[in-house]
């Protein structure tokens, strides 16, 4: 029996040299749309999440097969919110050849997770936000805050990007590194903002309805656990809620489960023209990390 060759190892440095938002944002638009076709173009069940209770962590397994793209992979991800000496999210992605089942590569998944998630939010923003947004407010100062800063800046020329975080030193660091305007309260950061991105590890709401200008777009990226929230339930209930996956949202999103809000549709359905983009209303993209 012929033995399969060992898969190639692809480091975070390798990834960062080739992955660019100019390619990734259109690719995420296509992937979100393919996922929502509902014709088997993409086979991706809701991920498996194993709580690692004795270490306050989670182990997530995310397999997927893009049939027409001939891509088959599984992301293995750990989420340890209390990590201080290493990232809270660590991952590797194993890529297989769908024609013969051979493993092709084991890729570092950290940088891919940061950029893929931000590119999905950028794709959602492009289809759900009003044109020419002026102010982007980012809540959170971690990995996703940086990647969302860069992905959204790739799409728009903002007059101002504002940042708030619960740790003032991290807000100052983010501001110094990116040129964003540091804010000491959420209210100050989101006042009159056209786009808000929530990328915190909070388990309770950080963003309130009364602080935002109606008719804006919100990328709600954190709180991917059934009993975690980032958004005030009143805000969720009064907005049009879009998701990446309708199947996962009622199982995984605390913001949807606890507010009992209805999901209007998937971003992929908007891209396909199957669902409307209500740009005059407040829109929320509740991202869960599918596709
Ligand atoms: N939807 C998706 O596809 C993905 C979602 N995520 C989620 O996005 C969020 C951010 O992820 P990363 O930036 O990688 O994490 P990170 O660990 O790099 O940063 C977390 C940030 O949240 C802040 N934070 C922690 N507890 C808080 C609280 N109680 N209130 C306010 N801020 C708090 C931290 O100070 C830090 O700024 C997490 O909830 C993560 O699970 C991450 C990857 C993909
Ligand atoms: O897709 C992803 O990597 C994640 N989704 C929620 C937490 C991390």
Image (tube, grey):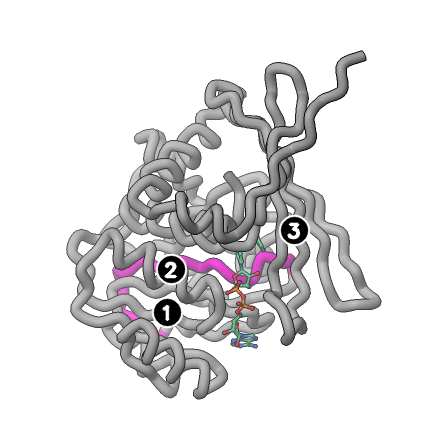
Label 3 SS: strand
Q: Position of residue 225 (x, y in %)?
A: 63, 58
* Image quarter (top left, top right, bottom left or bottom right) of the N terminus: top right
Tally of numbered tags: 3
Residue highlighted by disc 1? 138
Label 1 SS: strand
The residue at the point 40 percent across, 65 percent down is 146
The residue at the point 39 percent across, 34 percent down is 269
Between the residue at mark 1 and the residue at mark 3, the CA separation in whole angstroms equals 24 Å
Residue highlighted by disc 3? 77
- Name the N-terminal-most of marks 2 and 1: 1
Mark 1 Cα shell of 10 Å, populated few (<14), some (14-19), many (≥20) = many
Label 2 SS: helix
Question: Residue 288: in sight, yes or no?
Answer: no
Q: Nearer the viewer, mark 2 or mark 1?
A: 2
Do the residues bearing badges 2 and 1 touch, measured as CB atoms within 8 Å? yes
- Quadrant for residue 282, please give it: bottom left
Q: Position of residue 266 (x, y in %)?
A: 43, 40
Q: Which mark is residue 148?
A: 2
Mark 2 Cα shell of 10 Å, populated few (<14), some (14-19), many (≥20) = many
Q: Is residue 233 magenta?
A: no
- Name the N-terminal-most of marks 2 and 3: 3
45 relative to 202, above or below: above
| Range covered by the magenta-colored residues | 210-226
Mark 3 Cα shell of 10 Å, populated few (<14), some (14-19), many (≥20) = many
Question: Residue 185: in sight, yes or no?
Answer: yes
């Amino acid at each position: 029996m012929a033995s399969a060759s060992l898969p190639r190892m692809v480091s975070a440095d390798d990834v960062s040299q080739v992955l660019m938002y100019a390619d990734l944002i259109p690719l995420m638009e296509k992937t979100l749309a393919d996922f929502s076709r509902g014709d088997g173009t993409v086979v991706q069940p809701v991920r498996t999440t194993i709580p690692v209770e004795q270490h306050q962590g989670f182990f997530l397994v995310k397999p997927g097969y893009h049939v027409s793209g001939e891509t088959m992979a599984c992301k293995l991800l750990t989420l340890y919110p209390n990590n201080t000496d290493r990232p809270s999210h660590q991952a590797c992605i194993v890529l297989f050849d769908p024609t013969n089942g051979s493993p092709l590569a084991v890729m570092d998944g950290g940088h891919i997770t940061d950029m893929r998630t931000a590119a999905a939010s950028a794709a959602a923003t492009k289809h759900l936000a009003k044109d020419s947004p002026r102010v982007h407010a980012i809540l959170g100062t971690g990995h996703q805050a940086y990647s969302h800063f860069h992905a959204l800046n790739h799409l728009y020329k903002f007059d101002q990007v504002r940042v708030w975080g619960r740790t003032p030193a991290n807000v100052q660091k983010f501001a110094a590194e990116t040129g964003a305007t540091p804010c000491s309260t959420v209210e100050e950061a989101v006042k009159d903002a056209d786009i808000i991105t929530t990328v915190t590890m909070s388990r309770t709401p950080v963003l309130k309805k009364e602080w935002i200008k109606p008719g804006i777009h919100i990328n709600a990226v954190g709180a991917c656990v059934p009993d975690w929230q980032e958004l005030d339930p009143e805000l969720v209930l009064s907005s049009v809620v879009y998701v990446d996956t309708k199947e996962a949202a009622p199982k995984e999103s605390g913001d949807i489960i606890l507010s009992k809000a209805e999901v209007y549709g998937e971003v992929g359905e908007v891209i396909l023209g199957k669902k409307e983009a209500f740009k005059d209303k407040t829109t929320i993209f509740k991202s869960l990390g599918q596709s």
